[in-house]
Image (cartoon, rainbow, N blue to C red):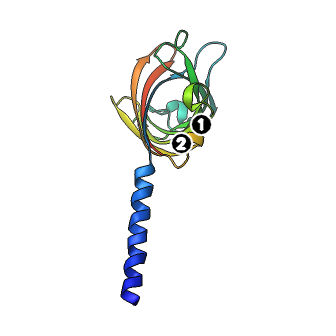
């Protein structure tokens, strides 16, 4: 009798797990992240630095706070605004320009309006494709996990303004 009860408990657990896995959705999002550091209305501002940041070849210790626009296409002025990337990035590489990215992609348009995705990870800026973790989300993306791939679309070496294409792969 105890063997039969154990069998039914295990069967119920296996069935519950398969239902949970099958009810998950997979979503791919592509947005363009605009980091504007120049001009009268920057979306990226330094808030702290170490005593050695200015002499470091990788700006080690620099802390930046962002509220960057996320657009549907690569043009900041003519593409549809999809949301904002809000958070920080920190120059965490001592010998190489590598950032620790901590951002929420907050969607303000389209079918994901009101939802957000939390992204965290290392961004080796001069690597062609950088991968960071999706560590959570809200509303539509509640219980999100996955990854984001970043590719630099444009970088203005005079102003340091950058446009980065983000492809985000989410299970939720």
Q: Residue 98, percent across and down?
A: 43, 36
- Residue 123 vs 110, above or below: the answer is below
Q: Nearer the viewer, residue 78 or 97?
A: 78
Element assignment for label 2: helix
Judged from this view, the residue extending furthest toward the top is 78
Q: Residue 151, percent across and down?
A: 38, 27
Q: What residue sits right under mark 2 in the picture?
A: 141
CB under 8 Å between callouts 1 and 2? yes
Residue depicted at 42% across the width and 62% down the height? 17
Disc marking residue 12: none
Q: What residue sits right under mark 1 in the picture?
A: 115
Residue depicted at 63% across the width and 19% down the height? 42
Separation of marks 1 and 2 at Cα, in angstroms: 7 Å
Element assignment for label 1: loop
**Which quarter shows the N terminus?**
bottom left
Q: Is the residue marked by circle 1 packed among few (<14), some (14-19), or many (20+) residues within 10 Å?
A: some
Q: On the image, which quarter does residue 123 sit in?
A: top left
Residue depicted at 56% across the width and 46% down the height? 142
Sequence-earlier tag: 1 or 2: 1
Residue depicted at 42% across the width and 17% down the height? 154
Q: Residue 20, percent across and down?
A: 45, 56
Picture mark count: 2
Q: Residue 49, percent across and down?
A: 60, 36
Q: Nearer the viewer, residue 93 or 101?
A: 101
Q: Nearer the viewer, residue 27 or 66?
A: 27
């Amino acid at each position: 009798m105890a063997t039969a009860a154990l069998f039914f408990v295990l069967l119920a657990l296996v069935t519950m797990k398969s239902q949970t896995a099958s009810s998950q959705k997979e979503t791919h999002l592509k947005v363009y992240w605009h980091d504007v550091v120049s001009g009268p209305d920057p979306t990226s501002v330094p808030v702290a630095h170490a005593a050695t940041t200015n002499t470091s070849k990788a700006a080690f210790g620099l802390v930046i706070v962002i509220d960057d626009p996320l657009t549907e296409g690569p043009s900041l002025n003519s593409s549809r605004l999809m949301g904002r990337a809000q958070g920080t990035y920190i120059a965490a590489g001592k010998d190489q320009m590598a950032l620790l990215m901590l951002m929420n992609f907050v969607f303000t348009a389209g079918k994901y309006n009101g939802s957000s995705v939390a992204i965290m990870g290392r961004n080796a800026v001069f690597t062609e494709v950088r991968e960071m973790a999706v560590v959570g989300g809200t509303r539509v993306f509640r219980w999100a996990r996955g990854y984001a791939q970043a590719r630099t679309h444009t970088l203005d070496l005079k102003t340091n303004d950058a446009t980065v294409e983000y492809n985000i792969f989410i299970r939720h």
